[in-house]
Amino acid sequence: MQVTFIFSMIFAIIITIFALANSGTVTISFVFKSFELSQAVVILVSAVTGAIVVFLLDLVTKARAAMKIKALNRQVKDLENQLLKSNESLAKAMTPNEAPTPPENPEAVE
């Protein structure tokens, strides 16, 4: 987490320096409209847009993983309940004669 944050900050600083070094005016054509903007603004807006897209994609991935974890935890709970019921029914099915009895004289068993 900290490594990712540090890497992101270094990358942001590099992008900012690059944008400020390239501050000439450029023409942006979008559909039927053209805009004259500073190249620095175009670079920074592109970088921020890319960061937002990556964040949203990561958010979707984390949400899917959380739903999968929740489903698996529910499955584990169901299986634990089945095992508990199985053990209870097995204990009820055993008669006292089937249960092992300890020897009466522990010294005699060798």
Image (cartoon, rainbow, N blue to C red):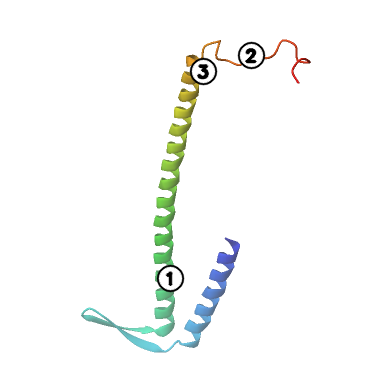
Please state which of residues 54 and 43 is positioned toward the viewer in this rendering.
54
Residue bearing the label numbered 1: 48
User: In front: 47, or 75?
Assistant: 75
Q: Distance between the residues labelled 3 and 2?
A: 15 Å
The residue tagged with tag 3: helix, strand or loop? helix
Location of mark 2 (residue): 101
Q: Identity of the amino acid at label 2?
A: Thr
Q: Which residue is nearer to you in this view: 66 or 51?
A: 66
Image vertical order of residue 40 relative to residue 67, above or below: below
Mark closest to the chain's N terminus, 3 or 1: 1
Give the mark, 1 or 2, whose residue is nearer the N terminus.
1
Single out the residue that lies furthest toward the right: 107
The quarter holding residue 9 reads: bottom right
**Number of the label disc, if any, that sits on residue 90:** none
Where is the C terminus found, in terms of image quarters?
A: top right
- Please say if 94 is above or below 44: above
| Residue at x 38% of width, y 88% of height | 25
Find the distance from the CA under tag 3 to the CA under tag 1. Answer: 64 Å
Crowd around label 3: few <14 · some 14–19 · many ≥20 (10 Å): few
